Amino acid sequence: MDLNDTPQQTEYREKVRAWLEEHKAQAPAVRSTRAGAEDEAYIDARRRWQGMLAEGGLAGVTWPVDFGGQGLGPIEQVIVGQEIGRARVPGILDTIGIGMLGPTIIAHGTDEQKTRYLGPMLHGDEVWCQLFSEPAAGSDLAAVQTRARQEEDGSWVLNGQKVWTTNAQFAAFGLLLARTDPDQHKHKGLTMFIVPMDADGVTVRGLRQISGEAEFNEVFFDDVRLSADAVVGQVNDGWRTALTTLMFERLTIGIGSEGMGYKEDRFAHAIASDPEARRDPEVRERLGEIAIELLAVKFAGYRALTALQKGQIPGPEAGLSKVTMVNAAIAAGELIADVVGPDALDDDSEWAYMISFLPGLKSAGGTEEILRNTIGERVLGLPPEPRLDKGVPFSELRAKEKEAATA
Amino acid sequence: MNLGLSDEQEFLREAARGALSRVKTIEAAREALEGGELPDLWPTVVEAGWPGLLIAEDRGGAGLGAFDAMLVAEECGHVLAGAPLLGLLPATALLQAGGDQSLEAVAAGEVRPAWLPARPPGDVVEGWTVDARTGKHRPSAPAAVVNGDTVRFTGEVAWVPDAPGADVFVVVGVDEAGAPVVGVVDAADATVEPIVRYDATRTLGHVSLDGAAGRRVAVDADEIARAWYLAQALLAAESVGAVAATLEMAVQYAKERFTFGRAIGSYQAIKHGLTEVLRRLENARSLLYFAGWAYADQPDQFALAASAARSAAGRALDYAARQNITTHGGIGATWEHDAPLFFRRAQLSRRLLGGTADATDRVAEALLAAA
């Protein structure tokens, strides 16, 4: 067992650290909340910083060299993340594009798409958003209803609505999953598209959450015209393309859970200054249990990295770390508010922000309940729940659902 | 970055599994519950070389680390094997740290030591303490009077794992100034009251010392504290093995048992419960890695890591043992079923060596001290 760098990793880390040391004066400030999302000047600064990171080889670390990446492994990605944290500068702005959508285009896109889109994505010149979830298709993603119809000239017309779209308010493009053939089964008849966010008929509306901030958006599509070359992968084979994106999402979660700032020492610090609290057996027990969960997440991350290094792709069980982390952070918010009192719920308090943010995070990237189903079935090998949507054309399925709901 | 098992560690684990499979430990656990005698696993332990696991190679041992010992403990826990590791291994760690003269004989299995546990001081409870026979009170560790290379101990240590059957005790006492002192005492010079309580696979004893003279072992307070945390890590590993075993049982049953026309494992109520067992199992296992890594590379974090592992694994085992019974339904709560054997293990284990709650408190203490 060894958590230390190999000599090559040490050398790489020193190179990254030196670059950051030289350039960090040009970086925008780190904001503890995501309050920057509505501040245009800040976003522009973050884009420019991402461009610098890309020039320095600190963005797209795992991307192939042919597309401007470094062609390195997940460990180097983690080293860059650690050094960026250590330098107290922001990381890349477009984590969704570079972490999930770019790799999807690399896997399924045409040569023209790769040439046109990957460079500006990497440099932050064009930010991307992920247009997958809908009001009635979240955990059950294959239930998307946003409809793309093909015209005689091969172009497409898009209608529908997406939701929970991070960065849509300043994104240049979105990767969108649409239904192209409702007469096929649910997982068939889907197609992946590249959508220019400035196209006629695209409307982005901020979606305010508990904290009052709009970190997500709703995106509406009214007769949006897309050219034939907007398709990523094959027509009616969009589910396969989507699975690639979701695999990269899992990878991001598997090694990235620790990066959310829910750390045991941060929570202990909030309590340590209260001499009564630090001797209170109940407070100590709660803090101990929370810390144990977060320490486990940290070492589960190291285990996942070890597996990745050996070329193993993390399975759905990587999601358990997210479940553990979110629930431990919720318990920490409870504990800190109990100790501090109503001041912890003040608008300006970092704890109020965390407490407001976590109920939604529980469902982010797939609800905890669906995740537990998937893990039960794929990891433990338990039989699936009987499903009523298998082998039924999507159009009939919708009719059945409506009938059942009104019965 | 490498937090995986080495080839040697895989081999050690396989060898442990093989050695234990030759003894029908689960059947023995049931027979012991009916009043039968537990099989003597000491010959198995000696043959496998476990007494020398933590003893240096130049003293006749294997020179391995805590994580290797935890792998063996995990295999023992998986089959509820009553191998006396909790008494043995912390004792050998102290003897090794002090370079005691008995190391070769211990490594060869000719002398069987058991450690008399003493809990290091914390920020709420001061002084070195031991488990009481009953209640929340924590008595002081036995009084030690040092005279040159000899030390005399007077006091009682209750609920000592693996005390019956030991040839010598590695005793932790405190001198007049409250400083910890370690000595090796012949078992014949102590009074051992053997106890079987709830989990018949666990050999326990209350040990009394009345001026018993022993050979002093030259170890410092950090090394003595380390023995406590090593025992916490071993108990954690043993519990992780037992959690894995109950999960296998429950998953198997959930696939085979049908209600309302389908396997019960297809219901979310069952599936989510078993996924929660898996979550707790994997978390506890990750903390075993933390403890193993800290023991070898980051000794100042070992107390935190071992305490975290003990707490997580203990609570995971309670949850898993109950979930296993729940998954089986009423049959899982019957005398004849194996599920209650693991339930018994869960209930007793969590109350030994300071208890799970003490381990949780030590995690909070470590973090508050550093904050």
Image (cartoon, coloured by chain):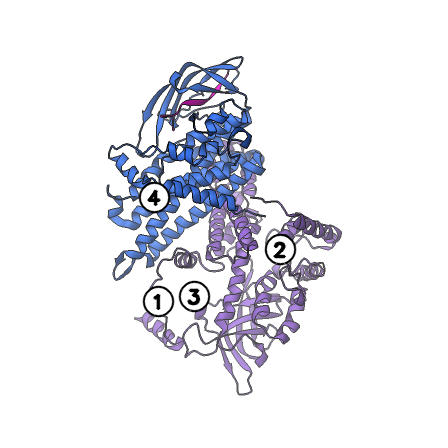
**Chain coloured blue in the rendered structure:** B
Q: CA distance from mark 1 to mark 2?
A: 39 Å
The residue indicated by pointer 2 is A77
Q: Amino acid at mark 4?
A: Ala
Instruction: Check chain identity for marks 3 and 1: say if they share one.
Output: yes
Q: CA distance from mark 1 to mark 4?
A: 31 Å
Position of A328 with respect to B198 (left or right) is right
Span shown in magenta: B162-176
Label number found at residue A140? 3
Q: CA distance from mark 2 to mark 4?
A: 40 Å
**Number of callouts:** 4
Q: Is residue A345 among what the camera can see?
A: no
Q: Amino acid at mark 3?
A: Asp
Q: Is residue A341 magenta?
A: no
The residue indicated by pointer 4 is B321
Q: Amino acid at mark 2?
A: Gln
Q: Is residue B165 magenta?
A: yes
Q: CA distance from mark 3 to mark 1?
A: 12 Å
Label 1, residues with CA under 10 Å away: few <14, some 14-19, many ≥20 = few
Q: Amino acid at mark 1?
A: Arg
Earlier residue among tags 3 and 2: 2
Q: Colour of chain A?
A: purple
The residue indicated by pointer 1 is A387
